[in-house]
Image: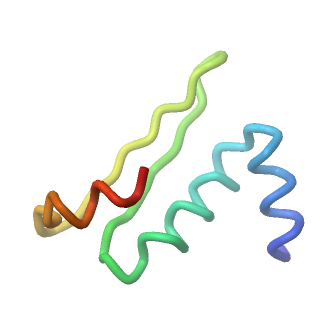
Amino acid sequence: MDSQTILALAKQGDANAIAVLINNSLKEKRIVGKVTRKEDCLQIILESSEVPNHAKTQSFS
């Protein structure tokens, strides 16, 4: 899938596309995102083998 398709799907609320974007963004930080959709809500879980530096993670907002 190309990046334009992934972005379009993410804008429509596609959980898999959102997970791809999150994981691409956080890959260097060694953080993995899991995204599921339940009715009108997205559940996003971020996992890492190490606790990230709090000051650095605030800039992700």
Query: Where is residue 27 shown, x and y percent of the image?
Result: 42, 77
Left or right side of 26 for 36: right
Considering only vertical position in the picture, is 50 above or below 9?
below
Residue 39: image location, x then y, percent: 65, 16
Where, quadrant-wise, is the N terminus in this rendering? bottom right
Relative to 28, say whether 8 is above or below.
above
Viewer-side residue, 29 vs 45: 29
- Report x, y in % for residue 25: 51, 71
The picture quadrant where one finds residue 38 is top right
Identify the residue at image location x=23%, y=64%.
48
Q: Position of residue 56 (x, y in %)?
A: 24, 66
Above or below residue 49? Residue 58 is: above
> Is 48 on the left-hand or right-hand side of 33?
left
Snapshot quadrant of residue 36: top right
Which sits in the foreground, 16 or 50? 50
Q: Residue at x 35, y 60 (%)?
A: 59
Check the image and report above or below for 11 versus 22: above
